Image (cartoon, rainbow, N blue to C red):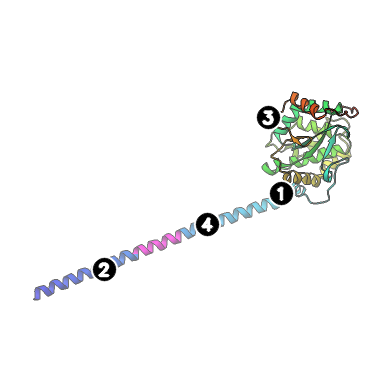
Amino acid sequence: MPPRFVAAGVSDKNEEGKRAARDRLVQQREREKARERRRRTLIVSAAVVGVLVLAAVIGVIAANSGGKGEKASGSGPVVAPSGATGKDSLAIQVGADDAPSTLTIWEDFRCPVCAQFENAFRDTIHQLESSGQLKVEYHLATIIDGNLGGSGSLDAANAAACAQNVGKFSAYHDVLYRNQPPETDDAFGKSSKLISLAGKVEGLDTPAFRSCVEDGTHNTWVQKSNTAFQNGGFRGTPTALLNGESIFPKKGNEPITVANLKKWVTEANKGKQPAKVTPSPTGS
């Protein structure tokens, strides 16, 4: 009997020791879980703080962007350039009013594909204008400013509208595309650059033109035109429509080429009289 009693007592103590060890292990695991939860909380909190700080910095940068940002906001009265036509006076027409066909072009002066289009088809378009077969309605957009930042699209469009006020839109439009900077270079965002290029168009660089460019006289008009572009369901710039039908980069299954453009205009004008011949736009 006594030995069995002693053995039972030893067994009970062993069981108690095991339970105590298990309890300590459970407590240690709970402490480790608590530490892990605190660590994760600190990481998440730090990330949230980082995001908030970044947002604050971005907000400060945006708030301190200054004059150009205010121009681009589209605030102020809408001042259309002289002779603007179309819905809400958002188009600038080149060519005779009674030309039998209309080419509608949406462009951005910073858009490199627009420059490629202009450089490829400029002479043909001017020939069709001057022979009375076609008039062109230009609409201006600022999508590159929105994609890459800066204000060159807006400022160049405003300057082109300033040129329109004295009947030199077409010549200045061509000069801008011939001298377009790389897409990522916001050179057109500098008034000095736009005024310097005006020197390539005879009689354009005047105090009135300079004031119009520097003051952003037509900025809100340009922004309204850009809004019309965004709401128009167009895929991008350039967009070219012949009598409302898309012809860029192709018309139906035919790609746009100089020969095809002439053919399409001839087909559209079949049975119609051309307008009176107008002088061909020029610019040095």
Residue 100 in view (yes/no): yes
- Element marked by disc 4: helix
Q: For the residues carrying marks 3 and 4, which lies nearer the camera in this image?
A: 3
User: Marks 2 and 1, how far apart in space?
Assistant: 69 Å
Residue at 72%, 30% (x, y): give it.
116
Along the polypeptide, which appears first: circle 3 or circle 4? 4
Residue at 71% across, 36% down: 111
In the picture of the structure, the residue carrying the numbered disc 3 is 253
Q: Which residue is disc 1 drawn over?
A: 65
Q: Which residue occupies the foreground of this view, 243 or 71? A: 243
Give above or below for 34 relative to 177: below
Q: Is mark 3 on a helix, strand or loop?
A: loop
The residue most toward the top is 259
Q: What stretch is highlighted in magenta?
A: 28-39
Quarter that holds the C terminus? top right
The answer to whether residue 37 is magenta is yes
Q: Which of marks 3 and 1 is in front?
A: 3
Answer whether residue 181 is visible to the viewer in this image. no
**Numbered tag placed on residue 174 in the rendering:** none
Q: Looking at the image, is mark 2 or mark 1 earlier in the sequence?
A: 2
Residue identifier under label 2:
19
Crowd rating for badge 3 (residues with CA inside 10 Å; few <14, some 14–19, many 20+): few
Give the quarter of the figure containing the N terminus: bottom left
Image coords of residue 268 (percent x, y): 80, 30
Picture layout, residue 4 above or below residue 191:
below
Q: How far apart are marks 3 and 1 (CA)?
A: 46 Å
Residue underneath mark 4: 46
